[in-house]
């Protein structure tokens, strides 16, 4: 079933937001889809269209529940295209620190389960800013961050970066207060960010306090940026972002200056936006 057929089958979205609406606000292109499934399908199709044009593309990848549907759609679409990702390079946005080796809560485990394993990506194709088991202090994390950024440069820069949108406006683990020129580095996680991760870890106490994240400046160097926000719990931050909030208070607002950025929403995440 093609994208247009899926949209027709889905019918009107809740309230006044229906179909695939396109607009621009606060310097960001916005697409509002009738459902979370259609939003994920649209993002997956953009990634795969890029790979079809450039098989050796460098992809910046994100984790979290928002991305599960994207990777599932990619895996399904590639069932009859074995080897389609054999030449890509991937660079994940972030990774927790202070996890035990092989932790199922690591972002590497997430990617192995949802994309790398099903699509057969090899070890040399994937990069993370820091191993999850690293005991890195800030002084130790910085060299790892520099090597990660050097690896992106060697790949020719990121062709496309996927992003989720935190409830406090963070992108990757760039929490409020992050600078526009920030690079890959160790960060302390905000309380709201740790609270949102508690279900994954089984309790708030089990959530790490630290991570290594790609910086805002690194993200903005990607040629294309695609942001995905799903659910009513993201409606407030989406409304703030598109109302023109400042970058220091809401790091996602830094994306407004990018030449090719699109925010994909389902109807629930876009429910606080006007229909015009």
Image (cartoon, helix red, strand yellow):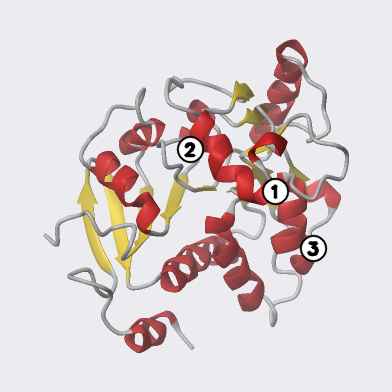
* Residue at 46 percent of width and 42 percent of height: 166
Q: Is residue 273 left or right of residue 236?
A: left
Residue 78: image x %, image y %?
66, 75
* Secondary structure under the numbered disc 1 in the rendered image: loop
Identity of the residue furthest to the right in this view: 101
Residue 149: image x %, image y %?
66, 28
Note whether 120 is above or below 106 in the view shown. Answer: below
Disc marking residue 117: 3
Of callouts 1 and 2, which one flags the residue occurring earlier in the amino acid sequence? 2
Q: Is residue 176 left or right of residue 128?
A: left
Task: State the residue position of label 2.
Answer: 171
CB of mark 1 within 8 Å of CB of mark 3? no
Q: Quadrant of residue 195?
A: top right
* Residue at 22 percent of width and 68 percent of height: 17
Disc marking residue 202: 1
Note whether 56 is above or below 52 in the view shown. Answer: above
């Amino acid at each position: 079933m093609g994208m247009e057929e899926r949209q027709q089958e889905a019918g009107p979205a809740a309230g006044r937001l229906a179909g695939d609406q396109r607009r621009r606000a606060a310097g960001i292109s916005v697409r509002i889809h009738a459902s979370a499934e259609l939003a994920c399908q649209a993002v997956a199709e953009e990634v795969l269209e890029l790979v079809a044009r450039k098989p050796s593309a460098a992809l910046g990848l994100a984790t979290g529940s928002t991305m599960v549907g994207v990777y599932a759609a990619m895996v399904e679409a590639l069932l009859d295209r074995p080897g389609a990702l054999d030449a890509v390079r991937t660079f994940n946005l972030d990774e927790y620190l202070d996890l035990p080796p092989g932790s199922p809560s690591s972002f590497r485990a997430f990617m192995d389960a949802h994309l790398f394993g099903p699509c057969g990506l090899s070890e040399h194709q994937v990069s993370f800013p820091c191993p999850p088991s690293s005991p890195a202090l800030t002084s130790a994390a910085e060299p790892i961050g520099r090597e990660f950024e050097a690896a992106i440069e060697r790949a020719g820069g990121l062709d496309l970066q996927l992003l989720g949108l935190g409830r406090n406006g963070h992108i990757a683990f760039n929490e409020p207060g992050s600078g526009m020129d920030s690079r890959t580095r160790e960060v302390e996680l905000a309380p709201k960010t740790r609270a949102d991760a508690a279900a994954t870890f089984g309790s708030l106490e089990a959530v790490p306090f630290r991570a290594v994240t790609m910086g805002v400046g690194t993200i903005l160097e990607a040629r294309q940026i695609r942001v995905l926000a799903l659910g009513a719990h993201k409606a407030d931050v989406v409304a703030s972002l598109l109302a023109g909030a400042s970058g220091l208070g809401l790091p996602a607002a830094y994306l407004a200056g990018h030449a090719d950025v699109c925010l994909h929403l389902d109807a629930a995440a876009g429910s606080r936006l006007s229909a015009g």
